[in-house]
Amino acid sequence: MHTTHDIKNLLDIQDPNITFSDACVEIKQDRGKVCKFISATLTYTPTHCAVCGMKNEHFSVIKNGTQTSRITLPLTGMHRTFLLLKKQRFFCKRCSCTFVARSSIVDRHCFISNQTKARVTMKATEAQSITLIAQDAMISVSSVQRFIQAYANEYLKPTNRLPENLSFDEFKYARGRMAFQYIDAQTGTILDILPSRFSCHIKNHFYTRYSYRERCSVKTITIDMNAGYEKLIQELFPKAKIIIDRFHLVQLISRSMNQLRIQVMNGFRRGHNEDQKKYRRLKRY
């Protein structure tokens, strides 16, 4: 009993139906990597049948063997950690169906623990790439993308209203592919993210979600120096003024000045001593 209590505290498992025995931790190779395997048992007396819903009276639901699942847990120490959970199977005499015991640590038909999903969600709020999050959580990149998308769909409330000031931006994701997002320029709130920055997809999104009257209420749209957005904005938001982001303006001026410096510097490169001094000054400063 003390072993079960200590391991539960270590792994942060709150399910009272899971028990651990002595010497339940084993370290061995899995696909060429050293991993930890922790064995546990999940069993309880069900109150009703999970298939037909009938109450368990007079032993109408009986135990019917076990089924072991390998569940991915958050990283403990230096090694990838798995929970070998031996789930109790049940048989209902009334409907002649079988079902497996369920636990709060993992969803049904899933082999990645809810703790790992929570870790992915927490890491997604930081400035990290999906690949780094996947390496930290010891799961695949596609799983990280799926969990983040599910979390966003659960908490992102779509609306048919637009603020007066918008901001368009794009970013890389999933092997260099570009995504599109539009933001409330005053509050910085992300209104929605589209998996593609193609004009046809952006048009279809705004035409489907927002009415013409709502799009006409937008006064300003801040963009980078992407010329493809100008024609798109004029078509979707006929009364909106286009504002170039100040960061990209300063970046453009800095690049232009640097190009001019290099051009003048190269003019003194093959000259005499005085020209060589000017070349070194322009190169150094």
Image: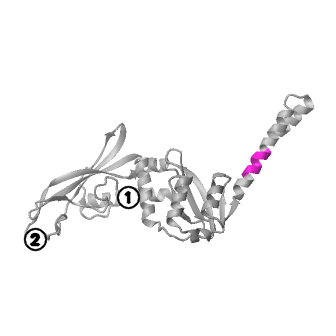
Expressed as whole percent of the image width and height from the top left, the position of residue 62 reads: 11, 62
Q: Which residues are magenta?
A: 251-257
Residue beneath the point at 26% across and 65% down: 16
Q: Secondary structure at mark 1?
A: helix
Labels 2 and 1 touching (C-beta < 8 A): no
Magenta residues, dominant SS class: helix
Residue beneath the point at 40% across and 51% down: 143
Expressed as whole percent of the image width and height from the top left, the position of residue 83 reads: 30, 52
Considering the image in quadrants, where does the N terminus appear?
bottom left
Of the pair 67 and 79, the residue shown nearer to us: 67
Relative height, residue 132 to residue 33 (above, below): below
Expressed as whole percent of the image width and height from the top left, the position of residue 14 reads: 31, 64
Q: Is residue 192 magenta?
A: no
Per the rendering, the mark at residue 115 is: 1
Of the pair 207 and 150, the residue shown nearer to us: 207
Q: Secondary structure at mark 2?
A: loop
Considering the image in quadrants, where does the C terminus appear?
top right
In the rendered view, does 141 fall on the left or right side of 62?
right
